Image: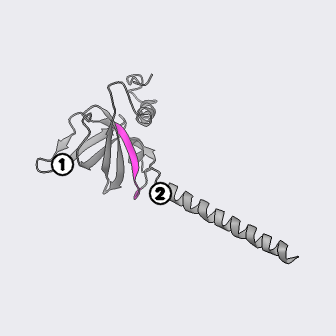
């Protein structure tokens, strides 16, 4: 092997090593920023990650919103009409937040309850986040409530 050919081989090897390292770093960074969506049924079944943030969506159960009188802490139940998960949130809720409305929260499970750090409410009376709509449809499939739920996205 000539010295020139050997230099090119080393250069190509270093270039491939650098590109591989950059791709590995990018994938690691992207993996840490992924927030997967789970329904209350999936959370109750233990499918949600234990120590990582994820999105939880469903309908706010009527009569479940409890507000603290001394601070901004709120506790409410979220359901997909098959299972219910208790959500704790500290902060200002969106203006459109109310009981019986579809919402998506971001947070993590702690001590068997969901601790949210973000709450997103739907933007009008006809819109339902696609993930929430799919979760509710799956929860209704084959249940006694099948046929009673009417999707607002159709």
Which residue corresponds to the image point at 11% horizontal and 47% vertical from the top-left?
A: 69
- For the N terminus, give its image quadrant: bottom right
Q: Position of residue 19 (x, y in %)?
A: 65, 62
Q: Which residue is mark 1?
A: 72
Q: Position of residue 70 (x, y in %)?
A: 11, 50
Asked whether, in this view, residue 98 is left or right of residue 137, the answer is: left
Q: Are circles 1 and 2 on residues that touch, CB within 8 Å?
A: no
The residue tagged 2 is 32
**Is residue 124 rendered magenta in the image?**
no
Classify 154 as above or below 111.
Answer: above
Residue farthest left in this picture: 69
Number of the label disc, if any, that sits on residue 38 = none
Closer-to-camera residue (44/25): 25
Residue 127, picture quadrant: top left
Residue 133 placed where, x, y %?
A: 42, 32
Q: Earlier in the sequence, mark 1 or mark 2?
A: 2
Q: Is residue 14 above or below residue 73?
A: below
Residue at the spot x=31%, y=49% of the render? 116
Q: Quadrant of residue 41?
A: top left
Question: How does the figure colour the protein chain or chains?
Answer: one colour
| Viewer-closest of 46 and 93 | 93
**Secondary element type, mark 2:** helix
User: What residue do we see at 28% from left, 46% from top?
Assistant: 86
Mark 1–mark 2 Cα distance, whole angstroms, equals 29 Å
| Residue pictured at 36% horizontal, 24% vertical | 126
Q: Magenta stretch: residue 56 in it?
A: yes
Please say if 126 is above or below 79. above
| Tag 1 secondary structure | loop
Q: Residue furthest front?
A: 4
Task: Please determine whether, in this image, residue 33 is positioned above or below residue 13.
Answer: above
Badge 2: few (under 14), some or many (20 or more) residues near its Cα, within 10 Å?
Answer: few
What are the residue bounds of the magenta stretch?
Answer: 50-58
């Amino acid at each position: 092997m000539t010295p020139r050919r050997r230099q090119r081989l080393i250069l190509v090897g270093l270039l491939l090593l650098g590109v591989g390292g950059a791709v590995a770093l990018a994938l690691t960074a992207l993996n840490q920023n992924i927030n997967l969506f789970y329904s209350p049924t999936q959370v109750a079944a233990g499918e949600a990650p234990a120590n990582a943030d994820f999105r939880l969506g469903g309908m706010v159960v009527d009569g479940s919103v409890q507000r603290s009188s001394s601070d901004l802490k709120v506790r409410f139940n979220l359901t997909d009409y098959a299972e219910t998960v208790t959500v704790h949130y500290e902060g200002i809720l969106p203006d459109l937040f109310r009981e019986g409305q579809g919402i998506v929260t971001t947070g993590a499970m702690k001590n068997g309850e969901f601790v949210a750090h973000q709450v997103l409410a739907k933007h009008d009376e006809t819109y339902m986040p696609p993930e929430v709509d799919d979760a509710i449809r799956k929860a209704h499939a084959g249940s006694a409530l099948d046929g009673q739920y009417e999707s607002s996205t159709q």
